[in-house]
Image (cartoon, grey):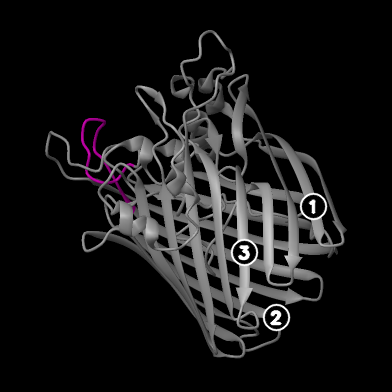
Amino acid sequence: ERGDPTAYADTNRFYMNTRGFRIAGDLGRVSFQTMFHETQAIMPGYIFWHGYTEGVLIGHGRTKFNDGRKFDAGFSQGNVSYSPTDHINIQLGHGRHFVGHGHRSMLLSDHAMDAPYLKFSFLAMQGRLQYSTWHTKLMHRLREADRLPTGDANEALFRWMRARFNHLSVHLGRAQLGLFEATIYRNITSEGVRPFDVQELNPVIGINTAMNGFDGERKTLVGADLRVKLMDKLYMYGQWATDRPGERQAWQAGLRVFDLLRKDLHVQLEYNTADPYMYMHQRPTQAYMHASLPLAHPTGTAFNEVVAIVEQGFGRLRLQGKVNLAARQRDPGPEASLGTDLRKPDEPADPPSEPRTEERFSLDANISYLVNPVSNLRLVGGFMRRDVQGGEDRFNSGLIYIAVRTALFNRYHDF
């Protein structure tokens, strides 16, 4: 039941109620954790319309709507981890991954839905070299039209695809350099599910790209991330990614400083950008997405963004301000394809036209008090503001909020 969204026009009071549990334990070299959260909420317009349109909400999960305003969203995470030696770890789980050192990731972010995975990690050179490789199962859009044709089943599976991610990280004194590779396979065609491709099991970074290239039916993305410690409390970081070298790319540059001018004053500045057509594919079902959401930056493609975060601590009391300034390109209509929408082929479509630009300003200023450091339980009060120039009024909002919340995982409302 999706309800009648026109009722949302009269909404000026909002709430979010999240309940859940987390259980973790260690049994020698085996550890485990499991977590489940369920949320009922009435959220600001831009969040509501995103969840209503896509069927899934950034940072929350698949959504269900009641009476046109309220939505339910739930997600679960868990894994079993085994370390046969101090240098090898094996994980079987259901969760998210994040690659990088910034607020955003241009390689792989944790704002999309959870997915099942099998991950192997290896440490060498006294921990200075770390290699991780994991196999996962992703989904296409979470709409009824994307379910597999399995007769009259009410809950048939959504169209899915498997993927392999590889990440090599090396500590070089004050610098940390990482290499990244992602391959999304085409497992379902009009003829049905393909036989299992043993190449999906290849754990060595670079081989899949060398064998598949960038223009085939598989989606291939490569990149690098870097962090350099300039001083004891100052470091710079960045990322670079491409899925068609020499034609399109995405990159990030950032700076973080701790105890700036005074104790517990921390500042982070970050710039993110992606060229048009980046992360797209000639077959939209193979784009760099999972369950309707981009796998890298939540904006998708064809954008520029500046993020500034300032925090000042006074013992358990914390003041925080976060500002996002972004400009993104969008197609002027459904028939156009100008490299701004991951759900379209990465080839220009008629009629020829120019993209329109949306400029977004987001602010979140809050004050919080830490109640329980173990669960990061805080009492919070703050103000959020979102203004979009060139967009619809329903995507603008202002919100004064008070909350009691934990921060056991990331949630992103700055999109």
Q: Which of marks 2 and 1 is nearer the N terminus?
A: 1
- Residue 254 visible, this angle: no
Residue 339 is one of the magenta-drawn residues: yes
Mark 2 Cα shell of 10 Å, populated few (<14), some (14-19), many (≥20): some
Q: Name the residue under label 1.
A: 32
Mark 3 Cα shell of 10 Å, populated few (<14), some (14-19), many (≥20): some
Mark in the foreground, 2 or 3: 3
- Where does residue 377 sit, x and y in percent of width and height? 81, 57
Q: Is residue 201 above or below residue 60?
A: below
Mark 1 Cα shell of 10 Å, populated few (<14), some (14-19), many (≥20): some
Element on which disc 2 rests? loop
The answer to whether residue 329 is left or right of residue 10 is left
Element on which disc 3 rests? strand
Q: Mark 3 points at which residue?
A: 121
Which image quarter: residue 327? bottom left
Q: How far apart are marks 1 and 3 (CA)?
A: 16 Å
- Where does residue 378 sit, x and y in percent of width and height? 79, 58
Q: In this view, does 405 lie above or below 366?
A: above
- Residue 366 visible, this angle: yes
Q: Name the residue under label 2.
A: 264
Q: Is the magenta stretch mostly helix, strand or loop?
A: loop
Q: How far apart are marks 2 and 3 (CA)?
A: 34 Å
Question: What residue is rendered at 81% in x and 64% in y?
Answer: 370
Q: What stretch is highlighted in magenta?
A: 328-341
Q: Distance between the residues labelled 2 and 1?
A: 34 Å
Give the camera-side residue of 406 and 191.
Answer: 191
Give the camera-side residue of 398 and 165.
Answer: 165
- Where does residue 252 sit, x and y in percent of width and height? 41, 68
- Where does residue 406 sit, x and y in percent of width and height? 77, 54
Mark in the foreground, 1 or 3: 3
Q: What residue type is labelled 1?
A: Phe
